[in-house]
Every structure is written in C-alpha cells, then in structure tokens.
Image (spheres, rainbow, N blue to C red):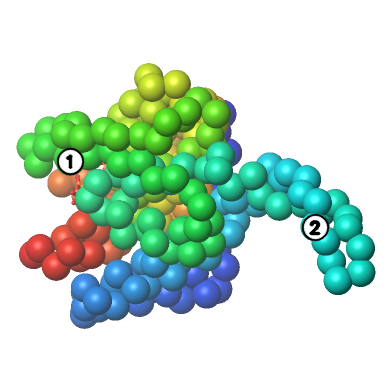
Amino acid sequence: MGKLHVIDHPMITHKLTLMRSKDTSSKDFRELLNEISMLMAYEVTRDLPLTDMEIETPLEKATFQVIDGKKISIVPILRAGLGMVDGILKLVPVARVGHIGLYRDPETHEPVEYYCKLPKFIEQRQVIVVDPMLATGGSAIAAIQFIKDRGGKDIKMMNLVAAPEGIKAVQEAHPDVDIYVAAVDDCLNDHAYILPGLGDAGDRIFGTK
Ligand code: PRP
Ligand code: URA
C-alpha cells in the first residue's frame, strides 16, 4: 500500500488557508500555489538519491555529494498541475518536465486524455506527478497508468488538497505510489468537488470563471 504523507507545516497550512478563500484573486492564488509547491517539494524530494562529486575547495580536493538531478521528472496533469511546476523547479531546477493532458468529463467525472509527452528514459527517472486536487482519484489513476504504460516505475503523487475517496482509490489502483498532500479534506459533493476544498483549481489559477 502506498504511504500517505500529510505535509502539515504551519507555513503550508497558512498559505493553503489563504488559497481556500473565495476572495483570493487568481494572481494571489497562483503565487500561493507556487510557494506551497516549493515547500512541499522539499519533503517530496527527501529521499532523492545522491551521487558523489569531486570538488576542489580553496584548500584541497575532496569528494562530496550532490543530487542526481537529471533523474527527476515532474509531470503536471494539465491544466491545474501547471500551477505547481515553477515552485518545484525553484527547488529542483534541473528536473525534466513532462505533461499529461486530462480533463474530467463534467457528467461522468471520468478522466479524458488529450495529451501526453514525457521526458526520454522515463523508466530511469523518479517521477513526481503533480495536481492541486485529488478528488475521485480518476485523473491521478489514469495519469499514473499512462506513465507506467510508457515504462515509468518510480512514481510519487503530489497534491495540494485530497479527498479521502481519492486517496483510497489511488492507493488501491497503484499500491506502489506514495501520495504527498498538504491537506486531507472531508469528502466529495454530488459534483465530485472536494469539501470544503478550494473550488475549481484550474479556473482559479487561470481566471477562467
Ligand atoms: C481537476 C483537477 C484534477 C481533477 C481531480 O482538473 O486539477 O486534475 O480535476 O479530479 P478527480 O480526482 O476526480 O479526477 P479538471 O478536470 O477540472 O481539469 P483542469 O485542470 O483543466 O481544470
Ligand atoms: N477538481 C477541482 O479543481 N476541484 C475539486 O474540488 C475537484 C476536482
């Protein structure tokens, strides 16, 4: 069973509370999402492999360790996942970025794929799938499956807000994938929106409603 990591740092909790308010503008929503994403990435990347590097200090040569950065891929689920990429890249600037285009059918709530482009050698990389919202889990399950179908093996899921239903669904469908969230909310409403949640993340990031 994939492990659930709830990253409940006070700075993250504070910023997320601001994001939830319906009065927060798209500009502030985007900025807060970027800031939280960077903070969450600190925890999500805690077990990244290190590699030896010889460095010459002003006094002598010695071997130290650096992150094997080329091996990391961030894969946002379009559209809303895009809002998390820059924050993570601030922490891991050499990460490669793939994209998976999915939207939820408004009637069935089932994910519909419209785009997929992943970095080369995905099978050798640690992949962090990012999306602010984990509601029914349908989009996350499909995105993870696309990556696995293309060879991905080492996959983590990173969400801002998750519903218990979505967490359970992802854990059952992909027991090898750890899930990192800033908050676990109460439940889904009849339209499969997270309660209390923060509304439609894509619309709030891009100002489309
Ligand atoms: C939202 C969100 C997730 C998905 C979560 O995207 O960003 O991708 O819904 O719901 P699920 O867990 O029930 O699948 P949406 O389909 O609204 O598309 P958008 O990002 O283009 O707004
Ligand atoms: N997608 C969103 O953007 N918000 C929700 O609450 C559920 C799905």
Picture quarter with the C terminus:
bottom left
| Residue 165 in sight | no
Pointers 1 and 2 in contact (CB under 8 A)? no
Secondary structure under tag 1 reads strand
Please state if 129 lies on the left or on the right of 72 as rendered.
left
Where's residue 56, x and y in %?
Answer: 83, 61
Where's residue 134, x and y in %?
Answer: 34, 46
| Residue 42 in sight | yes
Which amino acid is tagged 2? Ile
Q: Could you tell me how far apart the alpha carbons at marks 1 and 2 are, in whole angstroms? A: 47 Å
Asked whether mark 1 and ligand 1 are closer than 8 Å, the reply comes as yes
Judging by the rendered image, the residue that carries numbered circle 2 is: 55
Judging by the rendered image, the residue that carries numbered circle 1 is: 103
**Residue at left offset 9%, top offset 41%:** 106
Secondary structure under tag 2 reads strand
Picture quarter with the N terminus:
top right
Please state if 49 lies on the left or on the right of 121 as rendered.
right
Extreme residue in the right direction: 59
Above/below status of 204 relative to 44: below
Above/below status of 59 relative to 173: below
Where's residue 144, x and y in %?
Answer: 39, 31
User: Within the image, what quadrant is residue 143 found in?
Assistant: top left
**Residue at left offset 39%, top offset 28%:** 147
Which amino acid is tagged 1? Tyr
Category of crowding for the residue at label 1, using alpha-carbon neighbours closer than 10 angstroms: few (below 14), some (14–19), many (at least 20): some
Point out the frontmost of discs 1 and 2.
2
**Residue at left offset 39%, top offset 67%:** 34
Please state if 107 lies on the left or on the right of 206 as rendered.
left
Category of crowding for the residue at label 2, using alpha-carbon neighbours closer than 10 angstroms: few (below 14), some (14–19), many (at least 20): few
**Residue at left offset 34%, top offset 46%:** 76
User: Within the image, what quadrant is residue 149 found in?
Assistant: top left
